[in-house]
Amino acid sequence: MTLVKVNNPINKTFDGLMNELFNDLPVSFGKTIREDVLHFPPANIVEKADAYQIEMAVPGLEKKDFEVKLDGKVLTISAEKKTETAAENEKMIRKEFGYKSFKRSFTLDEKIDAAKIAARYENGILKLELPKKEEVKNEAKAIVIQ
């Protein structure tokens, strides 16, 4: 018996749609939920020997757009970009630029020295340095065997 494959344009379109849906879904689903529904940018948190570092990817903003507050143990990072209106004599053909405000909070533990928290914004990345308290820093200690 010989199998003959029929080239049906309807099946090809359906197969292409299904492949696109199921192959791309795992990659883009988390990003879509995070950015479109929850409205906050991704963050990386790194622990170093003497501090924690939070990095957030927030391109297109300026320093003045951010607000960083520490209320008790809750560190809140928020941003709002004011959109500029076009001049009255200009006609907008297509508008794809859009800025969303966001607000993201992190709960800090007692290891953080809140008085020394620092933040800087460069090249689209907001970096916060959260230094550890002196007594919390883990240092290697030699133990004498008796």
Image (spheres, rainbow, N blue to C red):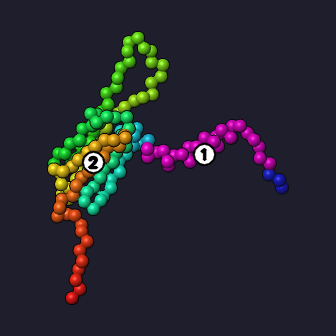
**Can you say whether 87 is above or below 5 in the image?**
above
In depth, the one of 29 and 14 nearer the eye is 29
Label number found at residue 19: 1
Could you say where residue 123 lies in the image, as x and y percent from the top left?
A: 37, 40
Could you say where residue 133 lies in the image, as x and y percent from the top left?
A: 18, 59
> Separation of disc 2 and disc 1 at Cα?
41 Å
Whether residue 133 is in magenta: the answer is no
Which region shows up in magenta?
Answer: 4-31
Asked if marks 2 and 1 touch (Cβ < 8 Å), the reply is no
Binning the other alpha carbons within 10 Å of mark 1 as few (below 14), some (14 to 19) or many (20 upward) gives few
Label number found at residue 128: 2
**Can you say whether 59 is above or below 46 in the image?**
above
- Callout 2: helix, strand or loop? strand
Q: Residue at x 45, y 24 (%)?
A: 95
State whether residue 133 appears in this view: yes
Q: Residue at x 25, y 57 (%)?
A: 51
Direction from residue 78 to residue 1 in the image, left or right: right
State whether residue 37 appears in this view: no
Amino acid on which the number 2 mark rests in the picture = Leu
Q: Which badge, 2 or 1, is on the more N-terminal residue? A: 1
Could you say where residue 41 lies in the image, as x and y percent from the top left?
A: 36, 42
